[in-house]
Image (cartoon, rainbow, N blue to C red):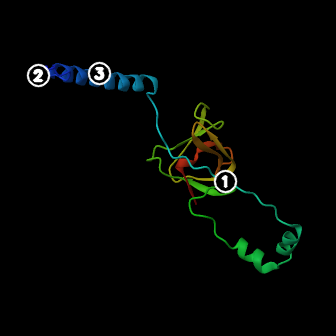
Amino acid sequence: MPEKSESFITKTVIITATLIGVCLCLITMIFQFLVFPNIVFENKENIHIEITSVSPTALNQDQTSGQSDQQSATDTPPMVGVIAVGMNIKVAGTGNEGLRMHSGAGIDQPTVFLAQEEELFRIIDGPKILDSLIWWKIEALNDPNKVGWSVQEYMAPN
């Protein structure tokens, strides 16, 4: 009669193998977080800008097309909310606290005047981007001595 051999797969072997597998998974996860803690997968699209030149004949045709084209271009109203040099603006959105006018662009520049809510100004220079803000040099319409740099956020076209 054949001898009865003991089975290699026992309850102890299965429990031990399971514990070793769980431990290896935990070690792998800990290692992954220690080595690559801030991996972020993002979809980044490349933007391609192509600049084409204009032929001299096309330029000449545009210039000689007549007064009607020039008239329609000058009659176009300014875009709502767009601020540019030469425009008149008013101080808006300060909550009646006023708008600080600085001696130069930047929050670290000294304040020279405090413009009041609804006060009218003309933009004479700018824009400059400093301190994550857009700065314009403005001059009061009623007092040419009241000149300074202020933040666009509190200006509205007038």
- Along the polypeptide, which appears first: circle 1 or circle 2? 2
Q: Within the image, what quadrant is residue 14 found in?
A: top left
| Tally of marks | 3
From the image, state whether disc 2 or disc 3 is nearer to you. Answer: 2
Horizontal side of residue 67 vs 16, given as left or right: right
Q: In which quadrant will I find the N terminus?
A: top left
Which residue sits at x=33%, y=22%? Answer: 24
Could you tell me the amino acid type at mark 1? His
Q: Position of residue 83 (x, y in %)?
A: 62, 55
Q: Amino acid at mark 2?
A: Met
Quadrant position of the C terminus in the picture: bottom right
The residue to which callout 2 is attached is 1
Label 2 packing within 10 angstroms: few (<14), some (14-19), many (20+): few
Report whether 71 appears left or right of 22. Answer: right
Judge depth for marks 3 and 1 and give the one in front: 3
Provide the secondary structure element on which disc 1 rests: loop
Pointer 1 residue: 48
Residue 25 pos. (x, y %): 32, 26
Disc 3 crowd rating (10 Å Cα; few below 14, some 14-19, many 20+) is few
Decide which of 21, 2 is in the foreground and name it: 2
Could you give the CA–CA distance between mark 2 and mark 3, rounded to whole angstroms? Answer: 43 Å
Asked if residue 103 is positioned above or below residue 116 in the image, the reply reads above
Amino acid type assigned to the residue bearing label 3 in the image: Cys
Q: Which mark is residue 23?
A: 3
Front position in the image: 20 or 152: 20
Query: Dot 3 lies on which element?
Result: helix
